[in-house]
């Protein structure tokens, strides 16, 4: 659950691609916009491509563009493509422990983690890349 900046950077990439309406945008341009290096960004774009959110074209004049309309890409889609789950990291106790707290902790945290993930995904599903462009990014 939002353990790094990949989610927000991916939203930036997808919003920039939506802003450029189907044009192929180079990773150098996107990296400069985000403030990261192109090599890191290409890895992030690879994850977005695996999730079916973008398509890429290699070579001179190549770049990245959205694989779908911005109104069909939810922030949940981006979250699932970029974040590792479960969101709440738990430590593992020894199976040899006789501690009564340890005995129920794994189940307790798993249940809480499931509810948190469902709430996060439900909220993110309500907003699309098109919503971000319309509501927050000037044209």
Image (tube, rainbow, N blue to C red):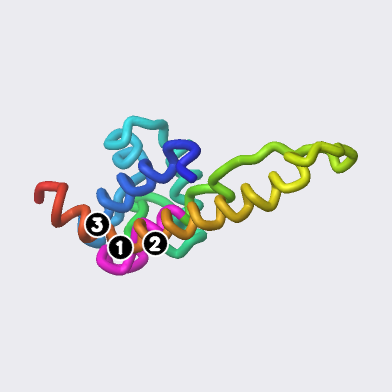
Residue topped by disc 3? 18
Magenta range is 67-79
User: What residue appears at the point 24 percent right and 57 percent down from the top-left corner?
Assistant: 18
Q: Is residue 38 above or below residue 44?
A: above
Q: Nearer the viewer, mark 1 or mark 3?
A: 1
The answer to whether marks 1 and 2 mark residues whose Cβ atoms lie closer than 8 Å is yes
User: What residue appears at the point 15 percent right and 48 percent down from the top-left corner?
Assistant: 136
Residue topped by disc 2? 122
Residue 84 colored magenta? no
User: What residue appears at the point 64 percent right and 50 percent down from the top-left corner?
Assistant: 108
Circle 1 sits in a helix, a strand or a loop, which is it? loop
**Badge 3: residue crowd in 10 Å (few <14, some 14–19, many ≥20):** many
Q: Position of residue 24 (x, y in %)?
A: 30, 55
State the residue in front, 139 or 1.
1
Q: Position of residue 85 (x, y in %)?
A: 57, 50
Residue 54 location, quadrant: bottom left
Q: Main secondary structure of the magenta part?
A: helix
State the residue in front, 98 or 66.
98
Give the Cα separation between the discs numbered 1 and 2. 7 Å
């Amino acid at each position: 659950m939002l353990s790094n900046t990949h989610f927000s950077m991916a939203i930036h990439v997808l919003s920039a691609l939506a802003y450029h309406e189907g044009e192929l945008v180079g990773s150098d341009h996107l990296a400069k916009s985000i403030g990261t290096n192109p090599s890191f960004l290409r890895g992030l774009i690879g994850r977005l491509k695996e999730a079916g959110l973008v398509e890429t074209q290699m070579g001179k004049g190549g770049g990245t563009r959205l694989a779908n309309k911005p109104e069909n890409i939810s922030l949940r889609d981006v979250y699932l493509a970029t974040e590792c789950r479960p969101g709440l990291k738990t430590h593992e106790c020894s199976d040899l422990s006789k501690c009564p707290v340890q005995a129920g902790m794994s189940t307790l945290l798993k249940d809480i983690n499931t509810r948190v993930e469902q709430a996060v995904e439900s909220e993110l599903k309500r907003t699309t890349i098109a919503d971000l462009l319309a509501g927050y990014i000037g044209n």
